[in-house]
Amino acid sequence: MSADQQEKLLSYNGEVLILQLSKAKPSEGGNIKMNKLHVRRIGFNSGTKLFVEKSTGSFNMSGEGVEMIHCSCASDFRTEILLPCILMKKKKKKSIKYMLLLLHHSNKFELVLHFNLDYELKEPIKLLAGPTVLWSYAKKLFYITPQTCTVLCAPVQFSSIKWAGKIKGEGIVVLGVRAACLSEGDNGQCLPKSDAFIWGSEFLAYAVEKQKILTNANFLPHAYSSIVSCMHICRAEAVSGKFRTSVVAVTCKSQLIFFQDGLPKEVHQLSGQTPCALQIAAVEGSSQLVAVSFTSGDACAIWKHSLQVASCWRNVKSILVDDFAGIGTEQILVLLKTGSFSESLNAFHLTDFGKINHVSSISDENDTHSAEELQDNYFLTIKALETRLQAGFASVRELQQHLQLKMKVLVESCKALIDLVQDQEHSLPSAAKEGLVSLWDETEKPFDNDTPMPSKDQERLVEEVWYRMMDDNLVVGVKLVDSFLLLLSDVTLSLVMDQKCPPTKCQCNVVTLKTAVQAQSASHWQLDLLPKRIKLDFHNGKECHEGPSQIKAFTAVTCLSPLMAFHRVHCMVLLHAKKKSCKDKNPQKSKNMTLLCGDILLSLAEISAGKHSILLNDYKCIGSVKDLLVLCAVSHKQAFQIISPDCTLIPLKTWLLEQMACVPVEEYPDCMVCRKSGSLNGTLFKWNLKTPFEGMLTVFYRNQTILFQCLHSLFGSISPTCKIRPLRLGSKKVLAEQLALFLEKEMVTLRHSFSSALRQTENRWSLTCKESKETDCIPAVQQVREAFKKEQKQSMLGMNQTVGGDLYRGIILNVAEAQLNSDMISWQCSSL
C-alpha cells in the first residue's frame, strides 16, 4: 500500500469490509483536491474455502488532510439497524472538522454528523448506539449524537476510558478510571470513600443518557484500575436493585482475569507481552473463546470455561470475530502480515475449534516461510495441549482416588456413630491397608463390613415407621408397641441424613387418637371421674382401661424443600427415650437410650408424582390413620371452653355438620374434617360435650386466618349469651384438673394395691389356722391352756404377715409411677 492510501478492516454481518482512503489529488482544470473512500465487501465461499469480493462502493470528499481515524458498527436511531460507521477527520486552518459516515446495505455512504474541535481526537474513541461519538480529553468526558448535533460534556472526570457500551435498563454506560475522590464526613473532614484511596485511582461507571453515576454497580476492584489494558463486560443486569456483573479483563502484566460481581474468580497467565485488544467469540456448542492480541503481532485464543489455550498465532495483522461461514455461531478469522488487507485475505486461518477449520493455501513464495512457521506453531501447540491433557487426566485420577478414600472414611464414621448411639462396639479397619497413617496405636481386629443390626430388645419396641408429605413439611412417624419400659413423655425423634444437608429445625410431638368405643363412651357427659373406672391387672403389671387402647404415635416435622435440593436423600430415624430399671429401688432413676427405628428414602421423582403426599386442595376424606396423624402434627392447636347459661349446646354439632361441612372420621368419631371449599378445607375439629350447657371445642388449623374464619362463623351460629373462653395449653385450670385426676388415680392405686396384699396374707393365715386345728382328747384345763396359747400364736402371726417379692415389686412400681405423675403435674402448676 502506497503512502497516499489508508486502509482499515471491519467485520459486518458475516462479511469483511475493506475500507480504503485514497489521498487527495488535484482535479482536472482546478486546484481542488479530491479524496476517495472506497469500500469492498468480501464474503467467505464455503465451496472454495476462500474469500471472494461481493460488491463495492465509494464516497468522494474534497480538501486536504482527510484521514480515517476510527471505524466500528453502531445502530441508527432512526431504524435501530446496526450499520458500519466511519469517523473521518479533515484539518482546517483554525480547527479540525470531524465527519461521521454511515454505510448502508447498498454501499451508499451517508453523512449523519459533523462537528468542529480545536484539538485532535485520540484513542480510545467509541462509536456507540445512535450513533454516538464518545471520547475523553483533558480528563473530561465528551459525546455527541445526531439528535443533539452539539458536543456535550459529562459532569465527571475520566483519566482514561476502559469500556463503553449499552446496559439494559441504563442505556449507554461508560466505565473509566479517575483519581481517587474523598468524601466529606459529618465533621467536615475528608474521609476515604473506599479502598481506592490506597491505590490512588478508582473505577467509575457513568450512565450517559440518564446523566448519573452508577453507585450500586461493582465491575472491577479499584486495585486493578491502573493495570487493566482492555476489558469486556459479558453480563451486567440489575437484580433486586443490585448489579450482577461478569467481566473478563487483560492486565498490562499479561494476566487474563475473570471477575464475578466485582471479585476476581479465575486468573490465567498469558505467554505474550503488552496486550492491546480483547474479543469474545461465541462458538458452536454454547462455548466462548477469548481472543487476545498483542502489540508484538502475537495472538492467542483461550477457552473461557476452562482457561485452556486453544491456539496461538504469530505474525498476526488482524483478528476478526463474526459468523463468516454462515452457520449461526461465530468464528475467529486470523489474518497474517502479508502486505495490504486484500493480500492478507489470501493468508488466513478461519476456525471455531470445532467443525470449522480452514487454512488458506499460500501461493506466493515470500509467504512460504510464514506458512512453515505457522505449521510449526500448530505442531508445538498440539504437543503442549497433549501434555496438558495427560497431566489433567493424571490429576483427575488422583482426585477420584482421593474422593473414594474420603467416602470410605465417611461411611465408616457413620457406622461408628450408629454403633455408638446403640451402645455397640465397632471395629475400625486398619489404616495401613488403606494407605493411611493412624493417629493412635491400633490393634488388629477382624473387621466386618456389614452394618450391625439393632438388638432384639430394641426391635420389639418399634412397631412401624412411616412418613408423609404435606405442603412443604416432611412428617416422620414412629409407632411403638405397648411397653412400660419407656417414659413416653421424654421420647424425641432425630433425623440423620447421609448427605451434607443444611441444618433444619425438627419439631417433635405426640399425637393421641381415641378409638370408636372410647369416643362413644366419652360422647355423653359423665359425672364420675375417669380413674374410678380403672382396673388393675397384676399378672402383667399394666393398667387396663375399659375398651380398646388409644392410638399414640410420635412424630417429627421438618422442612422438606432443603432436602429436595439433593434429588435423593437417605435418612435414618433415631428415637431418644428414657428406659426404666426394675432392679433399681428408685423408679425416678432411668437410663437414657437411643434406638435406631429404621430408615427412609426421599426421591424428588416420587414426590413430584404425588406419592406419600397429602393435598389439602383436593381433600375429601381421611385416607388412613396416618393421614389424620399428619394433619394433627403439622397444624396448630387451640382449645375453647364454651358455656351456655340459657340454652343447650346441641346446635353446635349442627353448625359443624352443615355450615362447616364437616365429616366425622369413621374410626374416630370425635374428629371431624372440614370439606368446605377454600382455605378452610382440611381443618380438623374435636367437639367434647361435658354437660348440656358446657363443652370444649378444639380446632387444628394451618394459620391464624383460618382460625379467625372459624370463630367468625361460630359467633353467628350460637346464642349471644354463650361465653367462649380460649384455653391455653398448660394453663392452671387444665393442669389443676389433670392434678385432681392423677391424685385420684394415685389413691385408687394405693387402695387396690393394699387390698390385694391384705387379701393374700389373710388367705395364708386362714390356711395356717386350719392346719393347726387338732381334736386330741385332753383334759379341760389343758384344753383351755392350749386354746390360749393358740390364740396368742395366731395374734403374733397376724401382726407379722409378709407378702411375696413379685407382688411387693409390682405394688411399689405402680405406686411410684402414680406418685411421679402427680408430682410432675404439681411442679408444672407451681411453675406457672
Image (tube, rainbow, N blue to C red):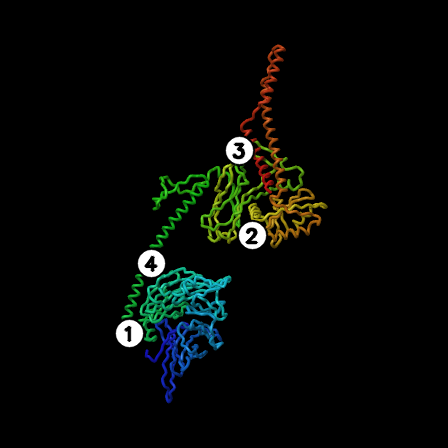
**Nearer mark to the viewer, of 4 and 3:** 3
* Residue located beneath label 2 in the image: 615
* Residue located beneath label 3 in the image: 586
Whether residue 552 is visible to the viewer of this picture, yes or no, is yes
* Residue located beneath label 4 in the image: 389
- Report crowding for label 2: few under 14, some 14 to 19, many 20 or more residues within 10 A (C-alpha): few
Q: CA distance from mark 4 to mark 3?
A: 73 Å
Q: CA distance from mark 4 to mark 2?
A: 53 Å
52 sits to left or right of 169: left
Relative height, residue 143 to residue 545 (above, below)? below
Labels 4 and 3: the sequence-earlier one:
4
- Report crowding for label 1: few under 14, some 14 to 19, many 20 or more residues within 10 A (C-alpha): few
Element marked by disc 4: helix
Labels 4 and 2: the sequence-earlier one:
4
**Nearer mark to the viewer, of 3 and 1:** 3
The answer to the question of whether label 4 and label 2 lie on touching residues, with beta carbons closer than 8 A, is no
Residue 197 is situated, as x and y percent measured from the top left of the image, at 43, 63
Which residue in the rendered view is the most extreme toward the top? 779
Residue 512 is situated, as x and y percent measured from the top left of the image, at 58, 43
* Residue located beneath label 1 in the image: 364
**Nearer mark to the viewer, of 4 and 2:** 4
Labels 3 and 2: the sequence-earlier one:
3
Q: CA distance from mark 4 to mark 1?
A: 37 Å
Q: CA distance from mark 3 to mark 1?
A: 108 Å
Which amino acid, by three-letter code, is at mark 3? Asn
Which amino acid, by three-letter code, is at mark 4? Leu
